[in-house]
Amino acid sequence: MRILEISLFHPELIRGGAQQAAYELFLGMRKSGLDATLLASADLSGPNALFKPGAIITGFDGRENEFLFLSDAFDHAWLRNLNVRALKWFEEFLLDRKPDVVHFHHFLTFGLELFLLARRTLPKARLFLTLHEFLAICRADGHMLRTFDKTLCTSASAVRCHQCFPDITPEMFRLREDWIKQAFAVFDGFIAPTAFVRDRYTAWGLPPRKIHVISNAQTDYATLESWHLRPPSPAGRSPRRNRFAFFGQLVDVKGLGVVFEALDIFAKRYDEDLIFEINGSNLKFASEKFRIRFDEFISGKHQLPERIKVSWNGSYAMTDLPSRMGRIDWVLVPSIWWEIFGLVLSEAFMFRRPPIASRIGGLAERVRGEKDGLLFDAGDASELADIFYRAITEEGLWERLSAASPGVPSVESIVESHLRVFSGRAGAVRRARAA
């Protein structure tokens, strides 16, 4: 089986959960001996040196079977690629590689036309799409947050979307939905990383029989020799579990603002020492308001008591996880949007660092509250401040939650699950179980 994995960005160029999951899956397929190719997009937000004169698809850093799709004319309003040459290059790439399976992980930067083009160019190939977010349903960056008050949105409709974007008529939102569903109709199946995502897209109109729930792939970096050589509890540290950390994108919806507010409340309400480390990048994609607030906390302009220390460690590669996880106790996942999967939960589980996460979306599905992690209402800084205190002071809490960590499924098992879907065997297994 010859497989083409098409990813939004390459994780070594722009960090993100969707591209990391796609890359881990690609590497897992290659390790399993499959003929897999990766095509990852790169746009003008990345290094301009990646754009070669006259070329749309280029090799990446001399790596075997890894290519970049250089996107420079993506229409965000209609999710289209306006560069006709890009479509031609993609068609020729498909004819050159002749994949049996084309597995898209996104359409952002690519364009919905590529779905239709893939079906027309390779009529016998099987096409699949992993649903990493809700951009197909929601024009507000797929976050399903009402634009006028930032409250959570539970469903989309022409009128509700018009309320978020008053300058766009309900009729245009209906056309947008029809256009996306027309493009989605070419797929043989869809993959959802959580049941939450499956249910949302089923309610939106995708056929339930076509959606398969498969966890995102994630290499278990806790198996690295460096982790075993590093003591989990650095010498000289407080016996209390008072070290918290955030890992991920430094953008508004990831909820760091809630943590900052919770730290203020904690400082007024409790007298315990607390250390908070921030690991992440892509601050340039955040709002100006968030960037200013972030700088205030990191630079020390925002006054906190000396017993509360906040630091930013910068971006991180996956191989940095052992050292960064090794010096903290708890992983904060304070998202304020309908988090799809939460790759950072996998990172926390593999190192047995209990997550403290928003009770929302895929996070609430994956974290077993009071068993392997703690949950709080999304956006509730006061509840989070109380959880900080409980995490630091409750005897045996960390040990109990850490011991119950589920870890992560092997990449090999995730590859096998995908292969069953690609070959059509997943449906047969599902029918057999039902019988």
Image (cartoon, grey):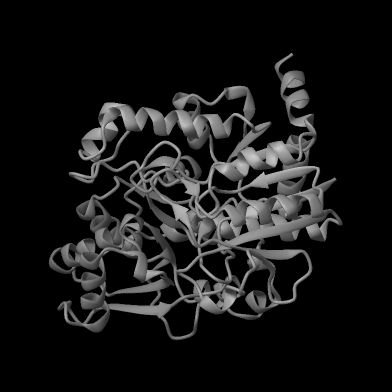
For the C terminus, the image quarter is: top right
Please state the horizontal and vertical placement of residue 123, each as a whole percent of the image: 76, 34
Q: Position of residue 3 (x, y in %)?
A: 77, 49
In this rendered view, identify the residue nearer to me: 290 or 35.
35
Q: Is residue 18 above or below residue 309?
A: above
> In which quadrant will I find the N terminus?
top right
Q: Is residue 288 above or below residue 406?
A: below
Residue 414: percent from left, percent from top: 71, 47
The residue positioned 15% from the left and 78% from the top of the image is: 303
Does the rendering let one see residue 243? no
Look at the image and tell me whether residue 269 can be seen. Answer: yes
Give 288 or 121, whichever is nearer the viewer.
121
| Count of numbered tags | 0
Q: Which residue, as the protein is rendered here, is positioned at the far top?
A: 435
Q: In the rendered image, which quarter is residue 147 located in?
A: top left
Q: Looking at this view, is 179 or 147 the one in front?
A: 179
Up/down of 208 relative to 273, above or below: above
Q: Residue at x 23, y 42 (%)?
A: 151
Instruction: Provide residue 202's location: percent of width, then percent of height.
Output: 50, 26
Q: On the rendered structure, is 148 left or right of 256?
A: left
230 left or right of 333 in image = right
Task: Describe residue 276's horizontal placement relative to residue 328 as left or right.
Answer: left
